[in-house]
Image: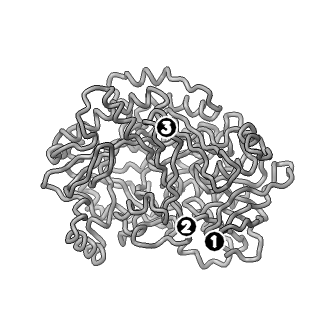
Amino acid sequence: MPSPRIPDYIIAGGGLCGLVLAARLSEDPSVFVCVLESGSEAFHDENIDVPANLAQTWGNPNYDWAMFSTPQKEASGRPIFLPRGKGLGGSTLINVMELTRASSVEYDAIEKLGNPGWNWNEFLKYFKKSESFAYSPQEAEAYGMHFDGNAHGTDGPLKKTFPRCMDMLAQPALQTADILGIHRNPDPSAGDNRGIFVATKSIDTNATRSSAASAYYEPNKTRPNLAILSGARVVRLLTGKDAGSGIVIRGVEYLKGDALNVLEASKEVILCAGSYETPKILELSGIGDPSILRKLGIPVVHDLKSVGANHQDHLVFTFTSRLNGKVETYDSMQDPEVAKTQKELYTEARTGLLSATPSLFAFLPLHTVDKDDIILDSARNLKLADANAAAQKTFKLQQEWLVDDRIPWIDINFIDRFMPGPGATFEPRAYMTINVMLLHPFGRGSVHITSSDPLQNPAIELNIFDNNVDLDMFVETYKFAREFLTTGPLGALVEEEICPATELKTDDDIKDFLRQSVGSSFHPVGTVGMLPEKDGGCVDAELKVYGTANLRVVDASIIPINISAHLQATLYAIAEKAADIIKKGI
């Protein structure tokens, strides 16, 4: 519980960014930090700590807010599942633990969009500050990995490792990638992430998940100047008079149970609620597009039309195949005897099927699937209609990236288990699922409140396949990715393709399947973008909300354009840099 002292900093959201900030800001014993987390304070149990148990948390109300998008017209009218971690540590409690980084070109582009100091060298500095990397060079070398010591941290809070146990699909998949002309990348974290590689993980050397809670909060939880208030949902900001440098945020209102409470801050309020909840809190507080706020009877405190706009996410679809009897996958855990043996192996030696998660990824430039530049030509002529300035600016940058072979557009990853899809039914056999991700969709969505009720989720509009380019790109990627099922050592393991359940003979057949199966990769960004205000930005390069004197946003919502990486590592770097900015009093 907070002490009677007024906090210097109120942090709204105890997820990844919130806990990094809390740990770093409270390093100064004269500063009092209070974190408000709407979920529980628990962050250790077997579903969280044991890496392979992660799927037990998805959709489970004990761990997941389990949000959904609006029905997507071009995705068979389906609402899309959007899990969000529920508890101290946020989505670091339920994610797949990859620690991938985008290309140096993409991080440099964030600075070129008008954000001084947000470039590859700065990100690298904070990647390293956040992590401690421990691995066996011999084990890594067996999979073609040779890590650059200058690209990795050795004494940061987050524990990073190379997988201790690799699934039996890894070597066949690597060998098949060789046949298909995909080069092996010995260290995708050093600024060039193209090729196929084994990803590092936020897993400790004892084969347990390293979350923001276990890495940043747990070692510091006894600090007298750090308070956590769990079960506390921030509903709106308390605004004061304009201080000449902007509207002063006095504190927050929050719900705990049925009681509405007030907490004031002497210095700053920092929103770390994520790409869905942060714009919601801003809008409920009267900061946003007046046309949205007035309809709901919310007084306009500050006209900032870009709040909730320019939403972007990675899109994904899956293949699932039944394998022959030559390989054991995680599906064997359905056998009680196998499960018993694996649990003993994990408990006694911290290895086996329970100790790791799928780790093999191929990040590919556009030309890999668009050899005749058909999609390229179409994408160059694509127009973004009726969008705000932020969406327009990032959309144009994305078009420039089309011809930059240093930037991956496709992520193919390999999963040693059954994952459900249209027409797929599980039988007690071995399975392989190939996830195919589109890293830079041209679709732009939004996140806006539809009610003044703070307990109602915002409307999350993804605008999936609202343009022909994203769909056509996925069609060609489908054709390329399917070659893994029919080629080399990996293809030799496939007994039957079960998702899609029927042969897709034409592009229209593939498009129908994609509309039925496409989903989110749960990497939303852009809804409170870091851009110049004239370009539709919501926060400046010091992460201050335009028009305010002491309100910052530190979470994925500030990333102005999506990147070719799973977001976790980038968010640790953002939060570490943000802490330094705040400490300097900028």
Secondary structure of the residue carrying numbered label 2: loop
Residue 362 visible, this orientation: no
Front residue (pair 189, 52): 52
Residue at left offset 72%, top offset 70%: 31
Image coordinates for residue 37, horizontal then vertical, percent:
61, 65
Q: Earlier in the sequence, mark 1 or mark 3?
A: 3
Quarter holding the N terminus is bottom right
Q: Earlier in the sequence, mark 1 or mark 2?
A: 2
- Residue 329's label in the rendered image is none
Residue at left offset 39%, top offset 71%: 46
- Residue 88's label in the rendered image is 2
Residue at left offset 36%, top offset 55%: 147
Q: Which residue is mark 3?
A: 72
Front residue (pair 70, 180): 70
Q: Which residue is mark 1?
A: 228
Residue 251 location, quadrant: bottom right
Quarter holding the C terminus is bottom right
480 w.r.t. 150: above or below: above
Disc 3 from disc 2: Cα separation: 31 Å
Q: Amino acid at mark 2?
A: Leu
Image coordinates for residue 568, horizontal then vertical, percent:
48, 54
Q: Amino acid at mark 3?
A: Gln
Secondary structure of the residue carrying numbered label 3: loop
